[in-house]
Image (spheres, grey):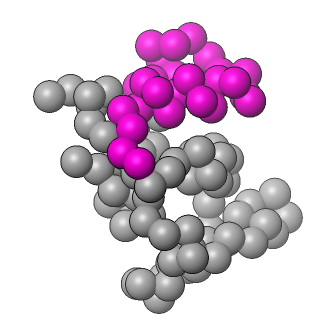
Amino acid sequence: MTQAERLYYRDDPDEMLLRPLDGLTLIYHRPSGITHIVDSPVPEILAALSHEPLPARLLLESLSADYDLEGEGEALDNLAAHLEELCALGLARAR
């Protein structure tokens, strides 16, 4: 299974408290008690994620409707990398 075939989703949005701060976003992850400081595109990716697992390519289509993204192949690779990082932090899930 390739990165693009993995399915990504997020838990209940109430588990994260997001606050913008001077061009960055603070994310307090309630289950872990950790506060993350992130920059774009992380808040946008988290906002696009839902409770329903989606492959990265469908998430990319959703993000492309609102944002001007680079070439599809490069954008998909970048999105998959961000999603894997979010999963490692516990802010997103994959299966």
As for residue 80 lying within the magenta part, the answer is no
Residue 92 appears at what percent x and percent y?
41, 58
Does the rendering let one see residue 78? no
Up the image or down, 6 lies above or below 93; here it is above
Toward which corner of the image does residue 62 lie, by quadrant? top right
Specify the principal SS of the magenta part.
Answer: helix
User: Is residue 89 left or right of 38 when viewed as pictured?
Assistant: left
The segment highlighted magenta reads: 52-78
Q: Residue furthest front?
A: 52
Quadrant where the N terminus sits is top left
Does the rendering let one see residue 72? yes
Q: Residue furthest bottom?
A: 33
Which residue lies at the image location 22% right of the left edge and 48% below the top edge?
95
Residue placed most toward the observer, 64 or 77: 64
Residue 82 appears at what percent x and percent y?
45, 43
Residue 77 appears at what percent x and percent y?
41, 25
How many numbered circles does the render carry? 0
Which residue lies at the image location 31% right of the left edge and 40% below the top edge?
7
